[in-house]
């Protein structure tokens, strides 16, 4: 089996049983979207696919906020499989920079492969799938769906973003609605515009039903 095939099989087992929107099919969608963006952008498909497959193996949200867990676990896996050091550095650098870390925190990606994976991951957080994932995550972590008495916050630091625990609907203003303007690839920007519009329609409808106007 090739390194990509071995990694896909390991990652699939690693994410088995997840019900927070970080299941294998999230990884598979991100991998397929990242490869599509990579083709348009002229990025290296091998690095792109490897980073997409490994991007959530050690997500800080599931490792007590440890923001280096992802790159550490990915590095161990790649080294066990004798990957070249420059490949390990590139893939682990992408994983370190990938995650959204709060409204005021810069997470620019130095490489085009990183930008393809980051755009693909962010596209999966918006649109209809994004709505589904947000409520799956909120339910899994005991968040209320909505509480009109708790206003959203724009977090200036990763520490503030990490420690938040508000209702799922606040996550839309704290993160999901900010993603469209942070997309970095041409196709990513186009798809994000349409998924963003769907988020706005969903929110309008949710609030109209809440107040009894629809
Ligand atoms: P990132 O690394 O940028 O957070 P992920 O692939 O880990 O990207 O997926 C993040 C997704 O997890 C969000 O888009 C959302 O669906 C869900 N999520 C994270 N935090 C929250 C939250 N506080 N409330 C609801 N959903 C959340
Ligand atoms: Ni992800």
Image (cartoon, grey):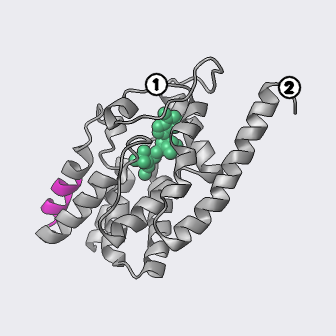
Residue 193 in sight here: yes
Question: On the image, which quarter does residue 156 sit in?
Answer: top left
Question: Does 79 lie within the magenta span?
Answer: yes
In this rendering, the answer to whether 183 lies above or below 148 is below
> How many residues crowd around disc 1 within 10 Å: few (fewer than 14), some, or many (20 or more)?
some
> How many residues crowd around disc 2 within 10 Å: few (fewer than 14), some, or many (20 or more)?
few
Query: Where does the magenta region start and end?
Result: 74-81
Residue 20 in sight here: no
Q: How many marks?
A: 2
Q: Position of residue 136 (x, y in %)?
A: 56, 37
Residue reaching furthest top? 149
Position of the N terminus by quadrant: bottom left
Residue plotted at (40% across, 47% down): 100
Residue nearest the observer in this picture, 157 or 202: 157
Residue plotted at (33% across, 62% down): 109
Residue plotted at (29% across, 60% down): 94
Q: Which mark is residue 23?
A: none
Q: Position of residue 113 (x, y in %)?
A: 35, 70
Position of the C terminus by quadrant: top right
Q: Identify residue for label 1.
A: 165
Q: Main secondary structure of the magenta part?
A: helix
Q: Position of residue 114 (x, y in %)?
A: 34, 65
User: Would the CB of label 1 be found within 8 Å of ligand 1?
Assistant: yes
In this rendering, the answer to whether 200 lies above or below 166 is below
As helix, strand or loop, the secondary structure at mark 1 comes to loop
> Decide: marks 1, 2 in contact (CB < 8 A)?
no
Residue plotted at (54% across, 36% down): 171
Labels 1 and 2: the sequence-earlier one: 1
How far apart in space, not on screen, are marks 1 and 2 (Cα)?
27 Å
Q: Identify residue for label 2.
A: 212
């Amino acid at each position: 089996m090739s390194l990509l095939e071995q990694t896909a099989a390991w990652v699939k087992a690693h994410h088995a049983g997840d019900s927070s929107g970080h299941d294998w099919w999230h990884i598979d969608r991100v991998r397929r979207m990242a490869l599509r963006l990579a083709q348009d952008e002229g990025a290296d498909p091998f690095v792109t696919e490897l980073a997409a497959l490994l991007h959530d193996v050690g997500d800080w949200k599931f490792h007590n906020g440890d923001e280096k867990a992802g790159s550490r676990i990915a590095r161990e896996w790649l080294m066990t499989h004798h990957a070249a050091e420059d490949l390990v550095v590139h893939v682990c650098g992408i994983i370190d920079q990938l995650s959204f870390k709060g409204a005021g925190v810069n997470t620019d990606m130095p490489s085009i492969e990183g930008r393809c994976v980051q755009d693909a991951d962010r596209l999966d957080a918006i649109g209809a799938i994004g709505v589904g994932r947000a409520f799956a995550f909120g339910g899994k972590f005991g968040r209320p769906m909505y509480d009109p008495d708790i206003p959203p916050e724009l977090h200036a630091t990763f520490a503030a973003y990490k420690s938040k625990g508000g209702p799922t609907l606040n996550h839309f203003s704290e993160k999901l609605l900010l993603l469209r303007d942070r997309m970095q690839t041409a196709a990513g920007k186009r798809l994000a515009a349409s998924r963003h519009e769907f988020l706005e329609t969903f929110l309008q409808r949710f609030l109209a039903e809440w107040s009894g106007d629809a």
